[in-house]
């Protein structure tokens, strides 16, 4: 039995390693202690799935080696060092473990806040290293009644807010992407005016690192702050412009800064380390035993599920999040993929354009439907190398036009999905389907022929001039080729033509197709397998 190779790129807790090592279908390579060039050269090419932390950049160099990779599990929250579009192009699913280290990071933030307020490491060193007992040198400041500004009120920011309230601080947050009630329900003020944050006594940031948040606090913002402000960053290096931060600390404008993260890590040469008014830690926000144990277990379990293709929990670049979809949508997605696949088998020619038309409430999910249709169409030619992650990119690369139309009020069926495939040679195939209340999938129209067809199994699509005796001939030829007919559906149009869809029990030989094509009434004959 060939095994799935899971490469662990950074140190994770042994609880996760144990899970990986004990799965009989998994070959574990723990490369956490390998130099990064060795990791890339020797182990990444072998990996079906990689587990990473912030010390491994998933960049161009990494991806160039990821020849058989199908998923990356970031054992933590931040994915700013993962090239997600690059992964998507290669069909690699990117997953993170979003909440297992929340408390660790929250408590680290509080630790820095208190350490800054009381200059804790400096007083500590003065006594311990210098053996000096001068209490008059160490007047701190209290958190009580101070105004705390929180930038980013997600999992970590909101919990920092709760804890700050317990310290009787006056808390305000800036996060344009939340419902303000998330803050106000906790008796925390919400502002849309960033200057309100800059006016605080202490400021802490808890946003992801994105184009929008890099350098969110720079020279100008620091100039607007109170003299003697305290700044905390336990989120990502670079959210506070490090040069401006250095200048602010040096001049005394900023009294203290508590910094866990740096724009370049390891940060042993960072100029901030030369200052006497910073508390620094080497990116330890997530480093509690509890957090690392939980993360490692989740990362290992999710990596195994992804390697086996069972599930992709917390996937960041899949077009759907299954657990967020209403129940009725999933069968439509499956059906749309089948219709796409069927269209491509009927076409037997490269796609030029794929258009998805969704009618009824399901039209709200047009983007996901389109992805599934695209996967269906392209899997005819590309088999396993096409998936939900890279479908859009591969279509773009092949200059296939992807079109969408939504009709919120359906006329006939409650919901109807149609895939219209235009081929390079101008042929157009149009197939529609629906899902009935009981979850039953049906193809209801092929190129204008009304049918009631279960999208399953091996089928012969036989288009003919509607004349007597044809059905008998078709049945006879199929029987002569040793195949049983499981189902026979007929659609007729007003131009004297008919479409028969015959489901057969075994493989459809080419000889059978040739014999059917030779019947005088035959217009076209295609074999389809779903
Ligand atoms: N030091 C460490 O070891 C750790 C650091 N982190 C960092 O902390 C960050 C936050 O983590 P979580 O709270 O779990 O993430 P989250 O996704 O729950 O919260 C992030 C919040 O930032 C907000 N946000 C995004 N852009 C914003 C903007 N321009 N202005 C204001 N708010 C904005 C979002 O709306 C969201 O509410 C992570 O992205 C990661 O970089 C996380 C864990 C450990
Ligand atoms: O989860 C995060 O975003 C973190 O910053 C923690 O990073 P780490 O796993 O400790 O390298």
Image: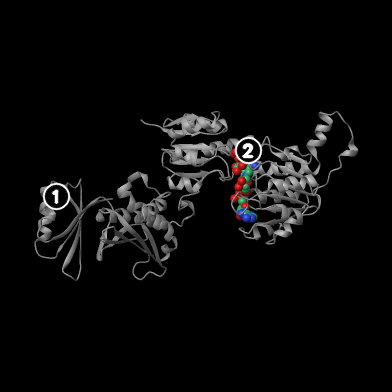
Quadrant into which the N terminus falls: top left
Q: Is residue 514 left or right of residue 246?
A: left
The image quadrant of residue 280 is: top right
The image quadrant of residue 356 is: bottom left
Most foreground residue, 106 or 381: 381
Residue 440 in sight here: yes
Residue receiving disc 1 = 512
Q: What residue is shown at x 34% (from left), y 59% (from top)?
A: 354
Label 2: how many residues lie within 10 Å, few (<14), some (14-19) or many (20+)?
Answer: some
Q: Is residue 85 left or right of residue 125?
A: left
Q: Secondary structure at mark 2?
A: loop
Q: Earlier in the sequence, mark 2 or mark 1?
A: 2
Q: What residue is shown at x 55% (from left), y 28% (from top)?
A: 33
Mark 2 → mark 1, Cα distance in angstroms: 66 Å
Residue receiving disc 2 = 265
Q: Is residue 52 left or right of residue 469?
A: right
Frontmost of labels 2 and 1 is: 2
Where residue 71 appears, as percent x and y from the top left, is 46, 41
């Amino acid at each position: 039995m060939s095994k799935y190779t899971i490469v662990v790129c950074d140190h994770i807790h042994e609880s996760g390693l144990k899970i990986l090592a004990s799965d009989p279908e998994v070959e574990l390579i723990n490369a956490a202690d390998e130099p990064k060039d060795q990791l890339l050269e020797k182990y990444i090419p072998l990996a079906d799935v990689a587990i990473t932390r912030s010390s491994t950049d998933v960049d161009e160099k990494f991806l160039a080696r990821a020849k058989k990779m199908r998923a990356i599990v970031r054992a933590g929250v931040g994915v700013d060092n993962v090239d997600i579009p690059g992964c998507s192009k290669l069909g690699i699913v990117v997953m993170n473990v979003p909440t297992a280290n929340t408390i660790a990071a929250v408590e680290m933030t509080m630790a820095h806040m208190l350490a800054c307020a009381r200059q804790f490491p400096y007083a500590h060193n003065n006594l311990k290293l210098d053996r000096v007992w001068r209490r008059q040198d160490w007047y701190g400041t209290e958190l009580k009644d101070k105004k705390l500004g929180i930038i980013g009120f997600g999992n970590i920011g909101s919990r920092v807010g709760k804890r700050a309230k317990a310290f009787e601080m006056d808390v305000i947050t800036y996060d344009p992407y939340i419902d303000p009630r998330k803050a106000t329900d906790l008796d925390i003020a919400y502002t849309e005016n960033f200057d309100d944050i800059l006016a605080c006594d202490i400021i802490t940031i808890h946003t992801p690192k994105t184009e929008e948040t890099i350098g969110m606090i720079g020279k100008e913002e620091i100039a607007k702050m109170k003299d003697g402000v305290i700044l905390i960053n336990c989120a990502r290096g670079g959210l506070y412009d490090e040069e401006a931060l250095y200048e602010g600390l040096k001049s005394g404008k900023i009294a203290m800064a508590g910094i866990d993260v740096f724009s370049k890590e390891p940060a042993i040469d960072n100029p901030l380390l030369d200052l006497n008014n910073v508390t620094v830690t080497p990116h330890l926000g997530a480093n509690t035993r509890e957090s690392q144990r939980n993360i490692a277990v989740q990362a290992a379990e999710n990596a195994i599920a992804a390697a086996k293709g069972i599930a992709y929990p917390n996937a960041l670049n899949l077009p759907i999040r299954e657990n967020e979809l209403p129940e009725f949508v999933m069968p439509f997605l499956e059906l749309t993929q089948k219709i796409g696949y069927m269209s491509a088998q009927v076409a037997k020619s490269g796609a030029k354009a794929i258009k998805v038309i969704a009618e009824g409430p399901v039209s709200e999910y047009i983007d996901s439907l389109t992805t599934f249709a695209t996967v269906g169409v392209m899997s005819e030619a590309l088999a396993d190398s096409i998936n939900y992650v890279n479908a859009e990119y591969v279509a773009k690369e092949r200059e296939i036009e992807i079109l969408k139309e939504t009709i919120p009020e359906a006329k006939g069926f409650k919901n109807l999905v149609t895939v219209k495939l235009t081929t390079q040679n101008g042929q157009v195939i149009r197939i529609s389907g629906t899902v009935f209340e009981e979850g039953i999938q049906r193809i209801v129209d092929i190129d204008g022929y009304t049918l009631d067809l279960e999208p399953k199994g091996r089928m012969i699509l036989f288009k003919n001039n509607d004349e007597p005796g044809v059905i008998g001939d078709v049945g006879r030829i199929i029987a002569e080729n040793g195949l049983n007919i499981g189902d026979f559906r007929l659609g007729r149009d007003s131009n004297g033509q008919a479409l028969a869809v015959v489901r057969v029990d075994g493989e459809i030989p080419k000889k059978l197709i040739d014999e059917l094509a030779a019947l005088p009434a035959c217009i076209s004959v295609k074999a389809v397998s779903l």
